[in-house]
Every structure is written in C-alpha cells, then in structure tokens.
Image (cartoon, rainbow, N blue to C red):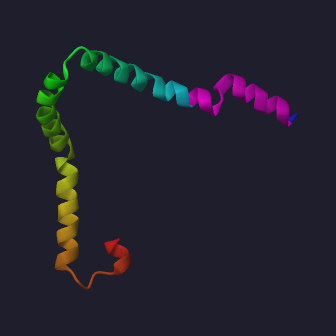
C-alpha cells in the first residue's frame, strides 16, 4: 500500500532529480548563451573585458563588504562582547 502511494506521488510531483533539473535547466541555457557570445571573441578582446567585469562584480558585492566591515568594527569597538554573539 505504501509503495502504491509513493509511486503515485512520484508520478504527480516528480522525483528529486526531475525537480532539480527543472531548477537547473534555465541556468544551463543562460550559461550556454553567454558561452556562445564569448566563443566568438578573441582572447585579447576577452582580456579587455576583464576590468569591466571586475567592476560589475565589485559593485554587486559592495553592500556585503560594507556589512562585513561594519560587523568587524562593531566587534573591535566592544571587547566585552560575548563570544557567541561575536560569531
């Protein structure tokens, strides 16, 4: 009886690997599109794009870096802070 329920649920909901594939496939398509764009340019052109890409990444991570710096400063300013709170 339990086997029947399990099989029925699997048919309706899909198994774990099928659900994972549904999540991953759109990203694979995006990666393949970007690869196709990059495959057409030369190595020198790609090297020229590197600083631009680094700038974009740095902008995206800036808020996280600022938050970490604030947390580090907070820990430095309060030496009496509980160790578990520091972690």
Quarter of the figure with the N terminus: top right
In what quadrant of the picture does the C terminus appear?
A: bottom left
Residue 53 x/y as whole percent: 17, 34
Q: Main secondary structure of the magenta part?
A: helix
Towards the viewer: 46 or 69:
46
The magenta segment is: 2-19
Please tell me whether residue 9 belongs to the stretch shown in magenta. Answer: yes
- Residue pictured at 42% horizontal, 24% vertical: 28
Q: Is residue 68 left or right of residue 28?
A: left
Which is nearer the eye, 69 or 9?
A: 69
Q: Position of residue 68 (x, y in %)?
A: 22, 60
Q: Which residue is depicted at the point 35% across and 79% down?
A: 83
Is 25 placed left or right of 78 in the picture? right
Estimate the x, y position of residue 20 in percent, counting from the top left.
Answer: 54, 31
In the image, farthest residue toward the bottom:
80
**Could you say where residue 81 lies in the image, as x and y percent from the top left?**
28, 81
Q: Residue at x 14, y 24 (%)?
A: 44
């Amino acid at each position: 009886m339990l086997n029947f329920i399990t099989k029925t649920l699997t048919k309706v909901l899909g198994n774990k690997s099928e659900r994972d594939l549904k999540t991953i496939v759109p990203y694979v398509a995006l990666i393949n599109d970007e690869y196709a764009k990059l495959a057409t340019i030369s190595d020198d052109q790609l090297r020229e794009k590197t600083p631009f890409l680094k700038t974009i990444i740095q902008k995206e991570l800036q808020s996280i870096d600022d938050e970490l710096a604030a947390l580090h400063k907070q820990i430095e300013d309060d030496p009496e802070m509980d160790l578990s709170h520091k972690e």
